[in-house]
Amino acid sequence: MDILSRELHALPIGAPFEGYFVIEHVEIKKHRTGEPFLRLVLSDRTGAFSALWWKPPKEADLAVFKKGDVVFVSGSVEYFQGNLQPKLKEIRLASQGEFDPKKFLSESRFSIDDQFVKLLEVIDSVSNPFLKKLLEEFFYDDDFVEKFLRAPAGKTVHHACIGGLLEHTLGVVEICETVAKRFKSIDRDLLVSAAR
């Protein structure tokens, strides 16, 4: 069973698990005996956790694992100083098509279709014909819209999900609408058209 990162926390100590994760960080360390082991930070769209591969086979090439690789792991749930730190029994690079990429891609908490309808309604409400035409050049272009609706607004914290740029843009539009209602001298159409 391909477990999610957040589900690991619900398992009891010693429980077995397996799943696909992205390597966020990897270090080759050495035991006191000189034998190598791996310390990793693994993640999916639900979170990240540290893990150790204490006893890799002698012939294992630990240098093959790189940040950004998707790996299959199996092991058991363990904690160290109160933090989840599973011990891995197996780790290997995953092949394309072996895992569902959606496991690693978070999506906007709001319906992308509903948000896009709201954005089109805002565009329709613009009365300046030149600004309206400019907005329509972008948001009535299928190729542009397909990319826009999937784009995140940022890489990590700031709406870093599929549909994030749309969610952010609508948030800025709402702020612009509020400001335009409060300050009547502001050109509402220009302000809303510049929102992004």
Image (cartoon, grey):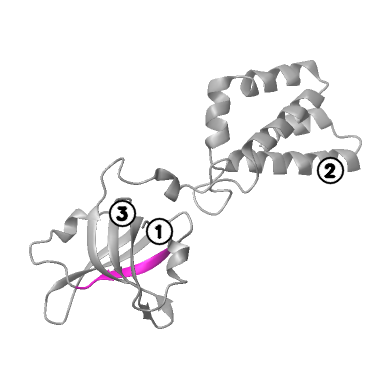
Q: Is residue 81 visible?
A: yes
Residue sitting at x 58%, y 51%? 158
What residue sits right under mark 2 in the picture?
A: 178
Q: Is residue 51 magenta?
A: yes
From the image, which quarter does the N terminus lie in?
bottom left
- Closer to the camera, 151 or 116? 116
Query: Which label number is shown at residue 67?
Result: 3
Q: Earlier in the sequence, mark 1 or mark 3?
A: 1
When asked about the image quadrant of residue 89, the answer is bottom left
Q: Position of residue 117 (x, y in %)?
A: 71, 31
- Residue located farthest toward the left when viewing the structure as drawn: 59
Judge depth for marks 1 and 3 and give the one in front. 1
Query: Which label number is shown at residue 43?
Result: 1
Q: Amino acid at mark 1?
A: Ser
Span shown in magenta: 48-54
Q: Is residue 56 magenta?
A: no
Disc 1/disc 3 C-alpha distance (Å): 11 Å
Q: Amino acid at mark 3?
A: Lys
- Closer to the camera, 186 or 110? 110
